Image (tube, coloured by chain):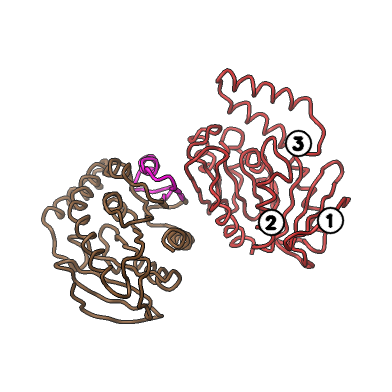
Chain colours: A red, B brown
Amino acid sequence: MHFISETSSDGVREQLFTLGDIPGVLWTPEDAVATRPLVLMGHGGGQHKKAPDILARAHRFVTDGGFAVVAVDIPAHGDRPKVEEYDRIVAEYQARVAAGEELAPLIAGFQALVARQTVPEWRAVLDAVQQLGHVGAGPVGYWGVSLGCGLGVPFVAAETRVRAAVLGLGGVLASAEAAARITVPVEFLVQWDDERVPRAQSLALFDALASAEKTLHANPGKHGELPAFELESTLRFFARHLG
Amino acid sequence: MHFISETSSDGVREQLFTLGDIPGVLWTPEDAVATRPLVLMGHGGGQHKKAPDILARAHRFVTDGGFAVVAVDIPAHGDRPKVEEYDRIVAEYQARVAAGEELAPLIAGFQALVARQTVPEWRAVLDAVQQLGHVGAGPVGYWGVSLGCGLGVPFVAAETRVRAAVLGLGGVLASAEAAARITVPVEFLVQWDDERVPRAQSLALFDALASAEKTLHANPGKHGELPAFELESTLRFFARHLG
């Protein structure tokens, strides 16, 4: 793990790092010295580790929850090089959008492909970050919606350190088998008028989770229109399960 | 409005009253002297104004929210006399349960029948309670699930004083038309494995609400198994909209 830069603002320390060829960012309370809960955040498709919504959420998690938060660029996103195979899939995606064809199977295939890489990468990131004195081996949470849900479901299913997860804006197609192996508490976000994920597939993914405690929050609006009050709810959810 | 008794415990003043032939109970902070938000709670079928879950919720609303809370017995419940027509419907209900027949249309008809009486009764209760110095004409919320949702939907649709409502554990059959006239924020509770309300009818009732802000919370479990953390969420919902 190689640290590139360190800055501070509003009580939050931000450290940019690389782990092998994975670029990442770690946020912690400025005065953090001991073990604390750690939340790994998976960004959305076309986004990156410091996308505005990730950054805003990370700051709230640090300042109000006292958590450490880590995010990394997924392959072909942010500071990482392009991947030819992904470009081909994106081109096919755009062609299908233009033709008004069904997108779900293509998205599902893409997510499964990327998850084969991100699951081991994210586990390695947890290993490295939890060795730092101001993070330590405390309880771990995962937050990710949209592509962050598609990649998060197989990750949460595989990684026993994760004790609670916020997922959503994702459908069952890519994820049914892995979802059935998730048993930790999940808060699952649905946008009622999601133009990308059919409502029935979204509800079916929630249904497929094997967790005894899982709670679905659905709100009106499109894929990108999560209401601000869900951030408050997410904070309380993690505080309840990681605190 | 005639007060029957007044007691206090844990900082909560409880006043039993009658308004005409409606028996009711009002909970307020012990030291309340001025106008405050008021939540009307509708109890479930076979329950009454001081059912344990109503009582526990009212105490939390008073102590943590500073609200006034009022609940009244619905016709043929609690301290009110039997209604022959209701008994006939209950007998038919039990026969249908025994025969494994569909219950939803019967429940819907029953709710519509009772609501024709409870909507004007509850409006009269608001009129009376809001004239008290320690309640006043502040913002009003409504809380009711199950039968309290079936009766609450037409009430919230009709009563412009209600600024926010918690509803749920109810289906669309009895309520679609009234739901489409509700425009205030709603938090809507669904039990994912509800043995009384088919999931699709539950989701359809949420869908039918015309509110720009409405949020559905679904949790695993049967009709009577609402998780405790939803009470916390309800409190914050009312604090946000009535505070």
Quadrant occupied by the C terminus of chain A = bottom right
Q: Say if residue A182 shows up in the picture.
A: yes
Going from N to C along the chain, the mark reached first, 1 or 2, is 1
Asked if residue B126 is among those painted magenta in the image, a careful observer would answer no
What amino acid type should be assigned to the residue bearing mark 1?
Glu
As rendered, which of A216 and B132 lies closer to the eye? Answer: B132
Give the residue displayed 77% in from the left and 52% down from the top.
A126
For label 1, the residue is A6
Residue interval drawn in magenta: B189-218
For label 2, the residue is A59
Residue B170 position within the rendered picture, expressed as x and y whole percent measured from the top left: 33, 48
Element on which disc 2 rests:
helix
Residue B172 position within the rendered picture, expressed as x and y whole percent measured from the top left: 32, 42
For label 3, the residue is A77
What amino acid type should be assigned to the residue bearing mark 3?
His
- As drawn, the residue found furthest toward the top would be A99
- As drawn, the residue found furthest toward the left would be B84
Chain on which label 1 sits = A
As rendered, which of B75 and A139 lies closer to the eye? Answer: B75
Chain on which label 3 sits = A
In the picture, measured across the screen, residue A30 lies left or right of residue B59, that is: right
Position of A212 relative to A117 (above/below): below
Q: CA distance from mark 2 to mark 3?
A: 22 Å
